[in-house]
Amino acid sequence: MIALAAFRLAAYVRSHRVYQALLLALAMLAIVYGSRAPRGVETAVLADGAVLIVPILAWAARSLLDTEPDRQRELSAIQVGGRGREVAAGLLAAFAACAVLAALVLAWALLLGVSVSPPPAALAAAALLYVLAALAGTALGALTSRAVLPSPAVSIMTLLLGFMVMLLVSASSLYWLTVPLLAWMKAANAGDLVERLPELAAISLAWCTAGLAAYVHLRRRA
């Protein structure tokens, strides 16, 4: 399964699809971090980047899972010993790609986006947001991949709509009904991200787990 995940990552890079997500991430970074944020808002700036990168990570996960032809996917399932391992390998590869892009965004934000590094506790909280962003992007990208939504137009529209729904719902008092992206930003801007992190992380993990479980269920039934 690990070998299959590495194979899919290598295929994703060799197909040059990785550059689509990379260029989108670099464009977002150039806009958001065109100038250094003033002292005192470091955590808020880092949280903004974690939220804005989610649709790009979803695009990356979707592209990686769509790189392998359908027939090759069936052969892969036979080679690794079942559909479950094949699905897990795909998700592992997608999360690895998202994690690398998220790490790039975080590093850029720390080096070029803020005037000073935030306190250790705030930095750890912000780093966890990027891990959660990678999970959310993986789940959203998987649910809009070709194996679930064969139509490319429907897939792209669903991906964008899913992200917009996350933003709209998380802006309300019912933020716990989705991955609370805007709640991350509100907590960071209010200065209480560290205190609210256990609650927000638990909600985010629950919805990411539900999304990944839904993808696994759909793939195993296909």
Image (spheres, rainbow, N blue to C red):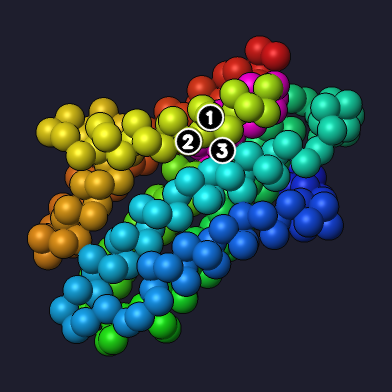
Q: Are marks 1 and 3 in contact (CB under 8 Å)?
A: no
Residue contact at pointers 2 and 1, CB within 8 angstroms? yes
The amino acid type, in three-letter code, at marker 1 is Met
> In the image shown, does 29 or 128 lie closer to the viewer?
29
Q: Earlier in the sequence, mark 1 or mark 3?
A: 3
Residue in view at x 57 percent, y 58 percent: 24
Does 159 appear above or below 18?
above
- Identify residue type, mark 2: Leu
In the rendered image, the quadrant that contains the C terminus is: top right
Drawn side of residue 176 relative to residue 28, left or right: left
Per the image, the residue denoted by label 2 is: 160
Near mark 3 (Cα within 10 A), the count class, few <14, some 14-19 or many ≥20, is many
Indicate left or right for 186 with 78 as reference: left
Q: Where, by quadrant of the figure, is residue 168 drawn?
A: top left
Does the magenta portion include 145?
yes
Q: CA distance from mark 1 to mark 3?
A: 12 Å
Q: Is residue 174 left or right of residue 57?
A: left
Residue 77 position within the rendered picture, expressed as x and y whole percent measured from the top left: 81, 29
Badge 2 element: helix
Q: Residue 157: which disc?
A: 1
Q: Which residue is mark 3?
A: 141
Look at 64% across and 22% down and name the residue there.
149
